[in-house]
Image: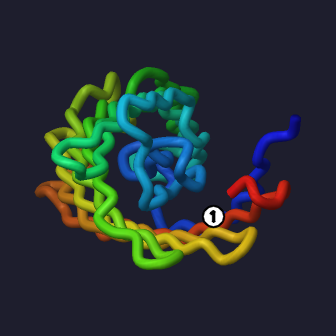
Amino acid sequence: MRRLALVCLSLCARAAFAQVSHPAMDARGYLTLDGASTLEHAELSFGLGSLDWGHGVPGADDLVSATLVAALGLHVLHVPLELVASLPIAISNSGDNQSSQGLGDAGVHLKVHLAQVGRVGFGAIASVYFPTASAPELGATGVTPELDGIVDVAAGRWRFAINGGVRRISLAMDDAPVVQVPAGVAGAVAVVPQKL
């Protein structure tokens, strides 16, 4: 029996390098963006998150990264939560025949489904990334906190999401921590009806 197939269109204003681009936390997301709903209580989700590629990124000419993600759905006091761990794996090339490969910054995330108003869902994600990168161009130089808001809507066979937030990050090429405002928009269509 055919399962749900999604055709995802991601228009992301997120930078395409390992320090700031992150995949969806679970199967409820849109490759590089999250959906507002969480996993059911005690439901697990494991995966290799979206593949990111950047050219001309700070600290490297080219960077390719994929992220391992593990999520656990929890309902605490009837509040739907999701606890997530992430770890990027990256390869970079600095152009002068020097390349590095290794791990990026490990992340711990807590996602909450705030409300469902008709077809519109609201959620939030609090994240902390730890400086575990094996090379300076693969991660930040300090702990990186991030807070994101999520709005998604179902319209027939289509789903749309908007993610936006704020992050404080310290990169090797910066003198002081900088505040970034990641944002993105995504859409998906169910190829098989009534499976969305």
Q: In the shown orientation, is residue 51 left or right of residue 114?
A: right
Across and down, in percent, residue 7 comes to 77, 57
Q: Which quadrant of the view contains residue 85?
A: top left
Q: Which quadrant of the view contains residue 132?
A: top left
Q: Where is mark 1, residue-wise?
A: 10
Across and down, in percent, residue 71 comes to 40, 33
Residue 66 appears in view: yes
| x 78%, y 49%: residue | 5
| x 86%, y 39%: residue | 2
Q: In the shown orientation, is residue 68 left or right of residue 131?
A: right
Quick one: 189 or 135, which is closer to the camera?
189
| x 58%, y 42%: residue | 50
Q: In this view, does 52 lie above or below 68?
A: below
Quick one: 8 or 54, which is closer to the camera?
8
Mark 1 is surrounded, within 10 Å at the Cα level, by few (under 14), some (14 to 19) or many (20 or more) other residues, namely some
Q: In the shown orientation, is residue 80 left or right of residue 45?
A: left
| x 58%, y 55%: residue | 30
Q: In the shown orientation, is residue 68 left or right of residue 180?
A: right
Three-letter code for the amino acid on which mark 1 is drawn: Ser
